[in-house]
Each structure stands twice: as C-alpha cells, then as structure tokens.
Amino acid sequence: MKFNKLVKVLAGVMLLGGGLFIGANLNTPAAQTTTAQAKTKSTKVVKVTYKKLAKKAYHVTKGTFYSTSKLTKANHYAVHYKNTTFYTSEQGTVKRANGKKAIYYYVKSSNGKVKGWIWHSYLIKGKAPAAKKTTTTTSTTKTPTTSTTTSGSTTTPQAPITSLVGESTSSSDTEQATVNVYGPLSQGNKILVSGTVDFTAGATAASVLQTLCNNSGVSVSISGTGTSLYVRGIDNLFEKDTTATSGWIYSVNGTFPSYSAGAYKVQSGDVVQWMYTETKGDRGWTGQ
C-alpha cells in the first residue's frame, strides 16, 4: 500500500513539473514565432475570384500596390503617385485562410509603368490633380543702334523688343523614383530608410540610393564606379556582418538586374529596393 501511494505521489509531481515546463515554453521566442507564423497563415490568400471591369479613371493618396492578386509582394506605394491617373481593368475578390474576403482592383497608369492590385476603397473616382509646376519668365531688350552717313553721324533709336510675359518658360526635367532599404530577414526585415527621390536623366540605382541616404542622414559606403560599383554598407550594416555570404543586393520593380547598380539607369516611377541578403536565395535572387 505504502509503495502504491509513493508511486502516485511521484507521478503527480512529474505531471505538475511537466505542466510548469510547458507553460513556461509558451512565452519563449520559439512560441512567439509560431504564433506569428500562425497569424500569417490565417491571412494568406487561398482563393481569388476574378471579374472584368470597364475602364474607368481613378487616383490614389494611400495604399499599397501588389504585383499579383496573392498580395505577397508590394511593388508600388500610392503615396508616391498622388498626381497619377490610374485605369481599372479587372476586379479580384480575395478570400483569406481565416475566411475573410476583400475586393481588389487591378489598375494601370496611362503610360503603363505603374500597375498592380490595390484595395478598392483606396481608389478615388476621377482623374488625379495635376502636379504643380514652377515656371520662370525671361525678357530681352534690344539696345538702340547707330547708323553713319557721308554727311555725318546720326543715331536712329529703335523701340526695345521685349518678349511677352510667359512667352519663354522653362520647366524642370526632374523625375521621381521610390527607394526602399530593408535590413536582414533574421532581424525582422525592417525598413532602414525609405522615400521618394528626385533625379534627372542618367541617374542610376546606386545614385538614387546615395541621394536618399544623404537626404535622410543615413550612412552609405560605396566603392568603385559604373559597372564595377559595389555597395559595401548601408546604415553601418556591411557585407559579411551577419554571415560569411551576407551583403547588399538590389531589385528594380521586383526584378533583379544582372549587372552593377552603378550601370543601371532608373526611369520615372521605378521602385528600387535594396535588401540585405544572408544566404543565397533568401531574397529570391539566386544569381552570382
């Protein structure tokens, strides 16, 4: 009898200890990671129903454009295109794993450079307001001339010729691109610096990065020029800081160019993304 009681007491202690151990594990980083992963899975798009839309004009002030209806990859941010008119072509009703549904429209700018899926409630009916442009006026005046004859010298004044106000104008050739810089995935893929950069013809993926960092007070280390240019570090995060193969790579509009950022010429509306990679393929890039 005493032996049986002793066995039961020991079993109870072991169960209690196991319960405490399991309870403690619920607050560990691993448990928190599992919770975050579960939340991500619950919002994952599992089904999309499509419907053709008539072409109508809209503009935006906020929201995110996604490259596909699965809503996994952002390629543009509406805040940078307040003066751009978009046109609808298709509707997608997405259903998430948690059962919730939402309606997204596929839109495209008139020049076709900016396009993607955006939540329909972020769209505002009508064309976008025109961007304000600064103009300068110039005027020219012709001075009197002197004509000479055999009988002497006479001065023949001519009326000054002045251009009409606004007749000669100049406007800026400045274009805009969006530049985003992401830290390591192992540290949460945090945005280290992001913004819209003004540039002129000839700007590269490297030069717009340097402009953004300079304007934001963020350090950037670059070596070489042109096709041999190499970005060593951004915001004091350098190559091989986290792993033996870690470093900076870039993409433009979701595509990884096969050559140096010092040679890649950006275009108006481009989205240039700089990402810190730690292992081959972790950013979707598997090239050399």
Image (spheres, rainbow, N blue to C red):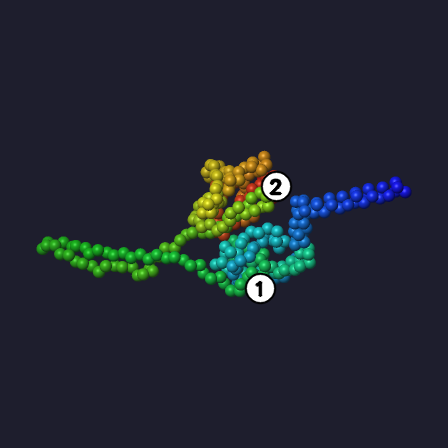
Residue 246 occupies quadrant: top right
Badge 2 or badge 1: first in the primary sequence: 1
Residue 213: x and y, percent? 47, 45
> Which element type, helix, strand or loop, lies under badge 2?
loop
Residue 87 higher or lower than 257, as above or below:
below
Q: Would you say residue 277 is visible in this rendering? A: yes
Query: In the image, is 256 to the left or to the right of 146?
Result: right
Q: Residue at x 59, y 51 (%)?
A: 73
Residue 126 higher or lower than 282, as above or below:
below
Q: Residue at x 53, y 64 (%)?
A: 125
Q: Amino acid at mark 2?
A: Gly
Residue 170: x and y, percent? 36, 55
Mark 1, residue position: 54
Mark 2, residue position: 281
> Which element type, helix, strand or loop, lies under badge 1?
loop
Q: Nearer the viewer, residue 196 or 156?
A: 196
Query: In the image, is 228 to the left or to the right of 21?
Result: left
